[in-house]
Amino acid sequence: MNQKETFPVTGMTCAACASSVETILTHTDGVKSAAVNFATNTVQVEYDQSTNPNLLNEALTAIGYGLIINSKDINESIENEQDKKYKDVKKRTIGSAILTLPIFILGMFFMDWDPGKWISLTLSIPVLFYFGKDFYINAWKQAKHGKANMDTLVALSTGIAFLFSLFNTLFPEFWTSKGLMPHVYYEAATVIITFISFGKMLEEKAKSNTSSALKKLIGLQPKTLTVITEEGEKSIPIKEVQVGDRILVKPGEKVPVDGKVSSGSSFINESMISGEPIPVEKTTGNPVFAGTINQKGSFQFIAEKVGGATLLSQIIQRVQEAQGSKAPVQKLVDKIAGVFVPAVLGIAILTFIIWMAFGGENAFTHALLTSIAVLVIACPCALGLATPTAIMVGMGKGAENNILIRDAESLELGHRINAVILDKTGTITEGKPSVKTIEWLPGNDNSDESSILLALEGQSEHPLASAVVRYLEEKGNKKVSLESFESITGQGVKANYLGKEFFVGNLRLLKKFNLSLSQEWKDKAENWEQEAQTVVYFGNEDELIAMIGIQDQIKASSKSAIKQLHEMGNEVHMLTGDNQHTAESVAKEVGIKQFKAGVLPSDKSEYIKLLQSQGKIVAMVGDGINDSEALAQADVSIAMGHGSDIAMDVAKITLITSDLQKVPQAFNLSKLTVNGIKQNLFWAFIYNLIGIPVAAGILYPINGFLLDPMIAGAAMAMSSVSVVANSLRLKGKKI
């Protein structure tokens, strides 16, 4: 019988590492399948009885990775591992920066001071071989699998620059005897290590944040709950709850597991499932779900699904799967490096051979200097800076415009989006019910009646009551003192004032008072409902006094933002947990033709998968816990700033202002940033295209010119300056 288990993985630093772990495990005896989730540093392995976790760990340890086994809390293990990794990279970056600064000063301003070479040598050894050792280890791992990436470039250029400098420090007479200066390049080697270590630190910081959303989702489930036993109420850990247990939920508590109400009633905030801000009334026989929040009432329910079977647990699992299902895109620079490294090595070797064959009297000296110059001028500093400098400036530009970007991949991908999914509540609409209209029947003194309505709604527990209270208080109304206040479950509230009974509630309560609507008011109520308004009736024992229309208002900027998205060539879809009537009304008003109502969190995720299967690059814009799974599944995820912490943690882009017009701005920013990256790569390669042949000595037969490795180092520095300067141009662009 096969067993499927998830383990945290140690030692992974890039997409190639994840691929190696997967390959090694897949080819281990007894393993049926292995799937690495690089976002959470885990691997799910299906294996038979012929193997065990210890054997799997041994297979990975042989190539420098490892599994954390015998862990009681896998999420805690992942978090601890990520935290440890980030702290380690941070320590190495700070350490290398402290030692690199004096080396840089000595190399730039005191290059002819002989003791400076020895000081630089002493300081550069720990920078390269302690703080920067991961670059050499990862390069070796890549080489064993016949691959090359950015780490390979860093290891080669810094290693060769260091060895050449070491030789020149120990044996300067080798060059002085030939009339040449024994230059050293310790500052070039250490600056590269420090710069690229800083980039790795930022990556690890962003990656460690991916688990915070899952932590908050897990935190929605209480650690203890109250069960009703024959002996009375008893508090137990959530792990001990069984299907069939009778559970008590008090006001303000979270529902611990899925089940069905057996007694009592209350309103429950189910926004994590539906996204709708209005709490749902629950009475006997109604379902309740783990993680939803009870309001003011108290009720008992029978547990039907516990542990991993609850809807909340399934959401957590699907968010994890969605985060890991998108294999991390191998950086463009890594892809280039895969070709560039062998090419540069080949040119350096070819340069050495040609000079040895045709160099004449000083063949070896020229062969060595030119091949070293080729390797130094092909230093990856400009190549390494091309993407991160443009990304950093792009992120800064976004922050200035209230667009917070946490993920470079999303910034690079934004300009290619062709399908945008919008949540309704809180994204297109305000996410807060408000009174749109109050119509009074002719002949009513609405100033006195307003005070009675305010007093009634002020005591009501119904979620819509607060919208009426807010509206009336803004108009300057004051409450009156009521008598015999009574809440009628599922209908509304009533109370006495000056000997007369007043009520506010739904159509059922209106009929209970034996009142009916005229055809004119029936038509009016129907029109309001067509416009996605909830209709509430206010009256007394003799007559209907007023009709109130309550609606979640559409944001002022939504219509123009959706128009911009259409003009940019995007398909715009709206998904909502609300009813078909309301969804149709909102979609029509903002100009969206493709929409779906009554969707659950998993439905949103499946909808995105369907679009992705059709070749669409999908952006999801949402604000609630119910959107977290869809946000994790989307190619680019955008959270509205006022939304839930979980949505903002899962999303890679957060809009601080909740203004939907920031979405097309984010896509424009992506386009400008990607153009900057392409220009940077162009400049980085132009230097190499011109510099490498010159360094190899192509001009020597023409005018006797040979490029000194020191000048090659300066040319490399200039390429870096041009890349940074080009990136900074983005600051002046309008998005």
Image (cartoon, helix red, strand yellow):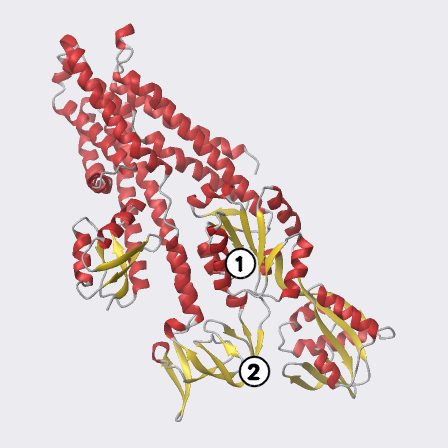
Q: Is mark 2 on a helix, strand or loop?
A: loop
CA gap between label 2 and label 1 equals 28 Å
Could you tell me residue 683's position as x and y percent? 40, 26
Residue at (48, 33) in percent of width and height: 675
- Residue situated furthest right in the rendering: 443
Q: Please name the residue that numbered disc 2 is placed on.
A: 283
What's under tag 2, amino acid-wise? Thr
Q: Give the image quarter of residue 526.
A: bottom right
In the image, 632 versus 541, the foreground residue is 632
What's under tag 1, amino acid-wise? Asp
- Tell me if residue 583 comes above or below residue 305 in the rendering: above
Does the CB distance between marks 2 and 1 fall below 8 Å? no
In the image, 496 versus 17, the foreground residue is 17
Q: Is mark 1 on a helix, strand or loop?
A: loop
Could you tell me residue 721's position as x and y percent? 39, 27
Q: Quick one: quadrant of the N terminus?
A: bottom left
Judge from the rendering whether residue 564 lies leftward or rightward of residue 608; answer left or right. right
- Count neighbours of disc 2 (C-alpha within 10 A) and say few if under 14, some if 14 to 19, many if 20 or more: many
Could you tell me residue 13's position as x and y percent? 29, 47
- Residue situated furthest top in the rendering: 703
Judge from the rendering whether residue 692 lies leftward or rightward of residue 325; answer left or right. left
- Tell me if residue 706 comes above or below residue 327 in the rendering: above
Q: Quick one: quadrant of the C terminus?
A: top right
Could you tell me residue 382's position as x and y percent? 35, 30
Q: Please name the residue that numbered disc 1 is placed on.
A: 623
